[in-house]
Every structure is written in C-alpha cells, then in structure tokens.
Amino acid sequence: GENVEQHPSTLSVQEGDSAVIKCTYSDSASNYFPWYKQELGKRPQLIIDIRSNVGEKKDQRIAVTLNKTAKHFSLHITETQPEDSAVYFCAASTTGNQFYFGTGTSLTVIP
Amino acid sequence: GAVVSQHPSRVICKSGTSVKIECRSLDFQATTMFWYRQFPKKSLMLMATSNEGSKATYEQGVEKDKFLINHASLTLSTLTVTSAHPEDSSFYICSVSTQGGVETQYFGPGTRLLVL
C-alpha cells in the first residue's frame, strides 16, 4: 500500500519567515494530495490541495508543489504568523477516497 | 466544504461499558464516511471505511467486533466501542468524502473518549 513520510516532525520559525514541510509518497498511482492544519484538540481543516496534473498551486500565503517524478510534494507558508502555529498533515490518495496521512509536523511561529 | 458534526464531543465511561459515537453530515449526502483514531501528538489512523447500506471495511489490525460501525443513512454513521477498556481511550474523528470530481475529506470535530 501507500506509504507517506513527512518531514520535519517539528519546525520553529520566526514570525515573518517562511516554513516548508515536505512529504514523500511511494505509490505512483496517487493522484490527489491534500494538506490539513490541525489545532490542538480540534478537527483537521483542509488548507490546500493539489492534483497530479498540476505542478504548483498557490493560495495567498500558502503554496504546494508537486514533483511526480520524485514522488514528493511540499507545503510552503510565507510571511508566517503566530496563528499559523499548528500541526500540519499531508496526505496522498490513490483511490480517490482512502487517504494515507503523513506523521504530522508541529509548526511553531515565534513572535 | 461539507459540514460534519459529531456527538458526543467528550465522553467518560467505565471499563466494560459500550459507547456510541455519532457522525452526521449536515449538508451533504455522504455515501462514504471514514473513522479515524488519533493518539496525542500522533497522526490520524484510519480505522474503517463506512459505506451507506453495506458493511464497513476495516483496516488491518482493527477489531470489527470491538468497533461496530453502522451507516444506516446518507447522513449518519455511528461507531460503537464495545466493552471499552482504558487502552481504547483516544480521540475518534470521522470524515465525509465528497465525490463527483471533488475527492477531499471533511472532518468532524472529534470525540474524546476516556475509559476509566
């Protein structure tokens, strides 16, 4: 089955700096890659997603890049703010329904 | 996105009792719902895929007789933790899969279960 690895597990950045989280996947059939943000004790919230026919997608301060050849995708957050502090999960989907989640990255933005 | 609710949000029960958790899709008819378990500071672990009108599909290592899933309607799926034990204490989250070309999942707020 699919195996999704996520790095780093923890990340601290100064407010205003950029944060990058990387994920790799193993199944070349995966074609959908969402990113979720989860604040403590709350539900995961979809923040951005990308499909395999696109190499990059941007939404304000958040962007995701996908390299199908290398089987990795990354989340980029620019101009980080304290409210960006949370745990971020990547996921890969092969069937269009079942998601395989990464292990999560705890992001701390230092004011 | 889809609006998903869960009830209860928090439950404490005695060891040996059963606990039912409800997951509702409030604005979307969900043919597929997912149940996850999450330990503190850990990732989401898929327990089972709940299909409306049919038996749930359980992931390897998840006891189907322990975690009973019922998806009787397009808006409601239930997870019953039977004969709960302290090791079942966890955060249980459901999600709804939107289809029709948009394949993402939207999560419920989760249920925190504590078994004493």
Image (tube, rainbow, N blue to C red):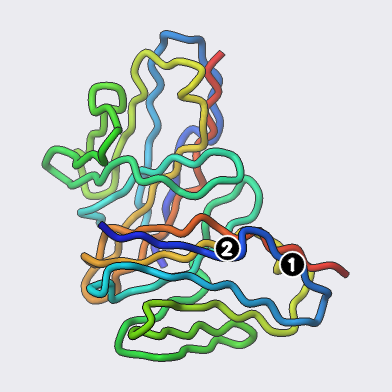
What is the three-letter code of the residue carrying label 1? Glu
Image position, residue B13 (x, y; %): 51, 15
In which chain is the residue bearing label 1? A
Instruction: For label 1, count other residues whose C-alpha is less than 10 Å away and answer few (under 14), some (14-19) or many (20+).
Output: few
| Secondary structure found at label 2 | strand
Determine whether A31 is above or below B82 in the image. below
Q: Which residue position holds label 1?
A: A83
Instruction: Spot the residue most to the right.
Output: A111
Looking at marks 1 and 2 on the same chain, the residue that comes earlier in the sequence is marked by 1
Instruction: Spot the residue most to the front.
Output: A70
Image position, residue B14 (x, y; %): 51, 10
* Res B114 → quadrant: top right
Q: Which residue position holds label 2?
A: A88
What is the three-letter code of the residue carrying label 2? Tyr
Image position, residue A109 (x, y; %): 78, 68
The residue closer to the viewer here, A93 or A38, is: A93
Say which residue appears at 43% left-offset and 70% top-offset.
A24
The CA distance from mark 1 to mark 2 is 13 Å
Instruction: For label 2, count other residues whose C-alpha is less than 10 Å away and answer few (under 14), some (14-19) or many (20+).
Output: many
Q: Quadrant of the N terminus of chain A?
A: bottom left
In which chain is the residue bearing label 2? A
Answer left or right for B70 relative to A49.
Answer: left
| Secondary structure found at label 1 | helix
